[in-house]
Amino acid sequence: MEVENIFLCGDCEEKLKDIPDNSVDLIFTSPPYADQRADTYGGVHPDNYVNWFLPKAKQMLRALKPTGTFVLNIKEKVVDCERSTYVLELILAMRKQGWLWTEEFIWHKKNCYPGKWPNRFRDSWERLLQFNKSKKFNMYQEEVMVPMGDWAKSRLNNLSETDRKRDESKVGSGFGKNVSNWLSRDRAYPTNVLHLATECSNKKHSAAFPEGLPEWFIKLFTREGDTVLDPFMGSGTTNIVANRLRRNSIGIEILPEYYEMVTEQLAPVELYLFEGKA
Amino acid sequence: MEVENIFLCGDCEEKLKDIPDNSVDLIFTSPPYADQRADTYGGVHPDNYVNWFLPKAKQMLRALKPTGTFVLNIKEKVVDCERSTYVLELILAMRKQGWLWTEEFIWHKKNCYPGKWPNRFRDSWERLLQFNKSKKFNMYQEEVMVPMGDWAKSRLNNLSETDRKRDESKVGSGFGKNVSNWLSRDRAYPTNVLHLATECSNKKHSAAFPEGLPEWFIKLFTREGDTVLDPFMGSGTTNIVANRLRRNSIGIEILPEYYEMVTEQLAPVELYLFEGKA
DNA sequence: GTTCCGCATGAATCGATAG
DNA sequence: ACTATCGATTCATGCGGAA
């Protein structure tokens, strides 16, 4: 099997124009947060953030398939003892632009950066904003199912007579009706909170997010052979994971050193052989 | 020791006017969410929610001490496959009103409502918006420190009577005073994510939130003898916890049946004796 | 007294059906 | 077409009765 990568170096507002209309299945990205990483990205002032982001979002809206999804990893920073509001304003502005704000997932960071301040605790979560072009988007929920809790496990251990009887008797409310549906299952659907650790000790460059994050959304919103786009590629985590999961990828990066680092690591065409008996 | 309770029955916009300026240390409340619980409360349409809430928030701003804190538990509902934006708009509107949006805590619900839909997972988190009147507010971080490692599993989780008694008897014997000193190595400051289960199968009345929620914020933002206000009292969870922690409480409730239920359970003046050797 | 098991019940959401 | 009501779906928890 073969997956293709396209890497573009430059401002994503311009480079996005090279991507055809309705051609991308998933956009997963973590843009530079306002005034963060000012040394590398130049930094965007919180007051200008929405205006800075909107024209890029417009291009993404154009490039995304009607069945596609845009997942935006972002968190507002603290300015003068207050949470900035640019993320809230961005959501409202993107809706006016035509996006649907379908859902907000929470990334609950297991091991967040330690620290102590007099007026706040450690910030251990980030937003994962899900935007869509239409109400009918692709979602493959079975791909991200998780092990069930203890209650169901113990139930599964003893498939006793009483359970089967209850199944057939179909008593009253609640589970009685379709016990067989979930009784045979050992996995449950997840929720909209993701509990992942940050990858603090990265050998090369510290990524903004762990591989598990794009992996979860790539599995959930795309299938093999689909196309994943990260317009703020950085060290290419999204693209690396996309390739591993046999999805085509597009990455845009403004900094040449990051761009070259990724192109050296990932070839434009990656070959994936079937592990089994190849 | 003695704590006083004031209970008012009526619309909180009016009843709040009976509370003096700058007299409340903590407001902790969970208002009726838009179009939810419409059978018990009137139900406010999402489009009208901000206008409905703002005049009440103005009274709360007046009643709160400059060093006080307002914690608002809320979550937007899904309307036509999209998240409503009224909570975002409320935050922006309250800032214009003079509030500082200091922080957003996440309540990660261990047991959220079940269900399966083609386009979304179960919603397992709610917002706990922290607003302040000034940048200098009271915060007693040591009161909510948690054992190193798994702070979620520990005392926040099991608020059983036995644990509570064990806890307070320690304090009563004088053992608790300097515990934080020599235990500080084993304890860590928490983060802004709270992992609590909902109390769904309560025999009496189903509360909107578990006792652990107001308990955490009452410990964090008030001391004994301070005053806690809940303008949407409901079944009085906030007030009950405030009393147990020896804080005065004010509760406002529009429904007479809830009002009477709480007044029967909590006397206007509650006496608290030291459990130890009394 | 324990431990185990059955059971009702949630700040839900979607799609179909009915007025 | 637009709104109101209803049925189907799902799973962690604490309670109470049974072993």
Image (spheres, coloured by chain):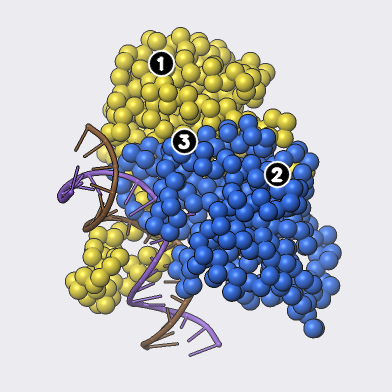
Chain colours: A yellow, B blue, C purple, D brown
For the residues marked 1 and 3, what is the alpha-carbon distance in whole angstroms? 23 Å
Quadrant containing the C terminus of chain A is: top left
Residue A13 vertical placement versus A93 (above, below): above
x 44%, y 46%: residue: B44
Quadrant containing the N terminus of chain A is: top left
Point out the tag, 3 or 2, that comes first from the N-terminus. 2
Which dot marks residue A59? 1
Q: Position of residue A91 (x, y in %)?
A: 48, 29
As shown in the figure, which amino acid type bears the numbered disc 1? Answer: Gln
Q: Nearer the viewer, mark 3 or mark 2?
A: 2
Task: For mark 3, name the chain.
Answer: B
Q: Position of residue A208 (x, y in %)?
A: 56, 31
In the rendered structure, the answer to whether residue C13 lies left or right of residue A35 reads left
Quickly name the residue at label 3: B85
| Rendering quarter of residue B201 | bottom left
In the rendered structure, the answer to whether residue A170 lies left or right of residue B230 reads left
Residue B215 vertical placement versus A89 (above, below): below
Task: For mark 1, name the chain.
Answer: A
Q: Residues within 10 Å of mark 2 (few under 14, many from 20)?
A: some
Residue B125 seen in render: no
Between B149 and A71, the residue placed more toward the observer is: A71
Labels 1, 3: one chain: no
Task: For mark 2, name the chain.
Answer: B
x 68%, y 75%: residue: B165
Quickly name the residue at label 2: B62
Labels 1, 2: one chain: no
